[in-house]
Image (cartoon, rainbow, N blue to C red):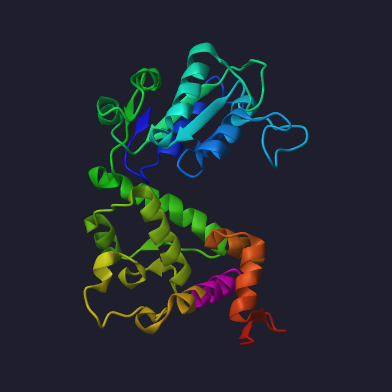
Amino acid sequence: LIQGESGTGKELIARAIHFDGPRRARPFLAINCATLTENLLEAELFGYEKGAFTGALANGKKGLFEAADGGTLFLDEVGELAPSLQARLLRVLQENTFKRVGGVEDIRVDVRVIAATNRDLRKEVDEGGFRADLFYRLAVVPIQVPTLRERKSDIPLLVEHFLSRFSTELGREIRGFSSEAQQRLASYSWPGNIRELRNVCEYAAIVCDSDVIEARHLTLPDDTSSEEKKFDNLQLQDMSIKSMESELIRMVLGETRFNITRAAGILGINRSTLYNKMKDYGLQRDQRGGMRRTV
């Protein structure tokens, strides 16, 4: 059981455990238990037989436990499981068998389950919100992940990793952060942990107009302490949310030389969504490969 605040890298730890162990050649599958309704999550985990519910596939469907057979299944935010799913998960852990939704046949699997949570499950157990038997079954090897503010010495290594990745995606060299920018990174409390650091680095890499990221490129809360503060690339104080999104898309398209696949990856959306947004904002490529607006 991996415990820690959101954004501390719990899934990365789970992946490291899997790929450094004897199951490395078998599947590693992950699901966030907080993102689906109880019925949908049950179908995703355990699969279903044909006719199990309205809209079910004609031939049924394998669940994640079947798909991960021999490998590892990572259950993020396991504390969000409904009581009925807690009971089903406990049975799989104890007996290595389960039934598909709408099925009668026991299916045997060999799956290592790694669970993660940002909640205090021991407290949840005491208050009756989480099954004690399931908690002790999951917490055989508990791992507590410290927050980024508790391990700020890791920030330079993480920043180096992120910048190397974004330099490749953007197709240009970014050597690093200026001294002032480094000080701001070191002094910030990082409530969003590694995920927030990654997002800050990604945004800075996109709006940076040289090979060194300056403090003005960092989107940290205390950057807005002065009402006169402005970004050289994005004048945010007078812009609507749509205007900011349009400008960011324009900048990413320019940085990637209109490579739609790379631009969509950097923005965290799929290609069709990017095309739709380009159409909405009137962003088109001109005959010389530059950018022009049609609205």
Identify which residue is drawn at 61% across, 85% down.
293
The percent coordinates of residue 14 (x first, y second) are: 45, 32
Which of the 4 image quadrants contains residue 103?
A: top right
Identify which residue is drawn at 32% across, 80% down.
230
Q: Nearer the viewer, residue 98 or 67?
A: 98
Image quadrant holding the C terminus, namely: bottom right
The percent coordinates of residue 27 (x first, y second) are: 61, 29
Q: Nearer the viewer, residue 113 or 175?
A: 113
Relative to residue 217, is residue 70 drawn left or right? right
Identify which residue is drawn at 28% across, 52% down.
191
Which of the 4 image quadrants contains residue 235?
A: bottom left
Q: Nearer the viewer, residue 112 or 235?
A: 112
Q: Is residue 287 above or below residue 90?
A: below
Which residue lies most toward the right here? 58
User: Which range is magenta?
Assistant: 246-256
Which residue lies most toward the bottom here? 295
Q: Is residue 16 above or below residue 200?
A: above
Relative to residue 180, is residue 288 drawn left or right? right
- Residue 249 in the magenta stretch? The answer is yes
Q: Is the stretch drawn in magenta largely helix, strand or loop?
A: helix
Q: Is residue 116 above or below residue 34?
A: above
Q: Is residue 39 above or below residue 69?
A: below
The percent coordinates of residue 86 (x first, y second) are: 44, 26
**In the rendered picture of this protein, how many numbered marks are placed on residues?**
0
The percent coordinates of residue 169 (x first, y second) are: 56, 59
Relative to residue 169, is residue 189 drawn left or right? left
Image quadrant holding the N terminus, namely: top left
Asked whether the viewer can see residue 206, the reply is yes
Asked whether the viewer can see residue 19, the reply is no
Which residue lies most toward the top here? 95
Which of the 4 image quadrants contains residue 68?
A: top right
Relative to residue 188, is residue 248 drawn left or right? right
